[in-house]
Amino acid sequence: MKIRFKARLYFFGAVISMVRFMKSQKLTTAVTPLTNRRASNAILVAALLPATTFAQTAFNWQQIQEKFLAGNPTLKAAQLNIDESRAAEITAFLRPNPDFGLSADGTQLTPYQGVYRPFAGTQITPSISYLHERQHKRELRRDQAKEATAVAESTYVDQKRGLLFTLQTAFVNVLQAKAVLQNAKDNLAYWDKELDVNRLRFKAGDLAQVDVDRLELQRVQFESDFETAMVNLRTAKIQLLMLLNDRAPIDGFDVIGAFDFTDDLRPLQEYRDIALAARPDLKVSVQNVELAKITYKLAVADGSTDPTFSVWWTHNPSFNNPYDYNTIGASVGIPLRIFDRNQGQKELTRIDIGRNERLLDANQALVFSDVDSAYWTLVQNLNLLRPYKARYLKLAGDTRDRVSFSFQNGGSSLLDYLDAEKAYRDVRLAYLNLIGSFLTAVAQMDMAAGKEVVQ
């Protein structure tokens, strides 16, 4: 908001200065209609400029990450899964509720010997019963819920890892699009200078009209490259803003960062070891094995019997003691687990332990595959980037300059000159694309290792 406010101040200050200049011109000199019209046009152009042009904000990679983690709705929804799992822990460790019962007995149903007093002998009996869980069922349910929460937390970290890879790729795409756009601008500016020189040659009679026309037509390709690069940059920014859940205008949003490569790779085994220690999906597989073991223990405990204790109070006297007006009774109910001893669930959970162990082995193999694939992609990009930076870029530029000089002095044909210019553009664009591929491979390695490992 401060940047935009300052931009508006600068804008209005420029307009006021222009008005004051026009007034001073009227007082000191006679202003021609042409001068007055040009000044008015300048003010009109300044007024039509969007405020976002002056208020563009650039974010580095660290700021983009913080903005993403704070505002991405997918991550926020995944965070709620952890909260739900923690709430389930409360339910899992609750004791069974006692049962309260109220019974009535002794109510006369029909008259007897001419006497009918239906409620004279009615006895109201309150009772309380409680199910006692054995074999540590409640503790096992708590452990199962806690392990499920740990799995949810690791799953959240793994989901964040995948989304950060997408974010980093989008960030690299914006940097690459900016570099390609700048390259298109430089090529267009260079070609305009070449056109100016060759127009002078044409005026001096040193160049034919058809050659000048062909050079003019070649500018279409540079303009096309510029417009394509501009569209690609806007598209890349739109994708990045979508991940950030940001509705800011495209012209007011920008990123900054080094668009270059680093020739500093560790040995492959180091990346493997880092991935084994840091990959959240591998941690999820380990936790799923532990969760399956706890679930099996709970299934075994559920096969045991749980007694139900009951106690009640009444005014009904016992048969052998007619004077005990207040009486109390108790009972114990034990289910007979003759047929159903939870056999099926025991076997199912036992098999599930083996299934999760096999999935753990498969996930370990996947970790090695991801790291190896990312590593050799980095090696391939570096093998291509080294000669480009050390030789091919300079060679392409020198060749273009030499052929241009030779063409201007009549030593080379127009075709040779255009071929040299195209070769330079191709080499330069290929180099920028290789850097983009390298930085994308860096993001791939970071995702494969579970954290940022390539600077």
Image: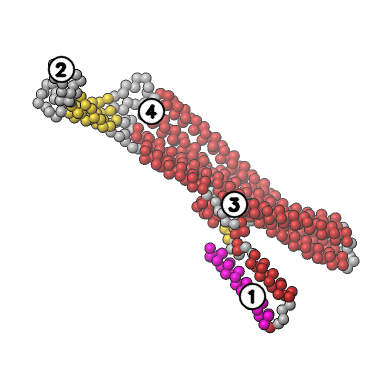
Q: Kindly report which numbered mark, 4 or 3, lies closer to the viewer in this rendering.
A: 3
Camera-side mark, 3 or 1:
1
- Residue at 68% x, 80% y is 26
* Neighbour tally class for label 4: few under 14, some 14-19, many 20 plus, Cα within 10 Å: many
Q: Pointer 1: residues within 10 angstroms few (<14), some, or many (20+)?
A: some
The residue that mark 1 highlights is 19
- Residue under the point 88% across and 59% down: 210
Residue 368: image location, x then y, percent: 57, 40
Q: What residue lies at 52% left-to-right and 54% top-to-bottom?
A: 66
Lateral position of residue 394 relative to residue 8, left or right:
right
Q: Residue 399 vs residue 271: left or right?
A: right
- Pick the residue in front: 212 or 107: 107
Labels 2 and 1: the sequence-earlier one: 1
Circle 1 SS class: helix
Task: Report which residue position mark 3 lands on.
Answer: 240
Q: Mark 3: which secondary structure?
A: helix
The local secondary structure at tag 4 comes to: helix
Q: The magenta stretch spans which residues? A: 1-27
Instruction: Work out how far the residue at label 2 is from the one at label 1, CA to CA, in angstroms.
Output: 118 Å
In the image, is residue 131 part of the stretch drawn in magenta? no
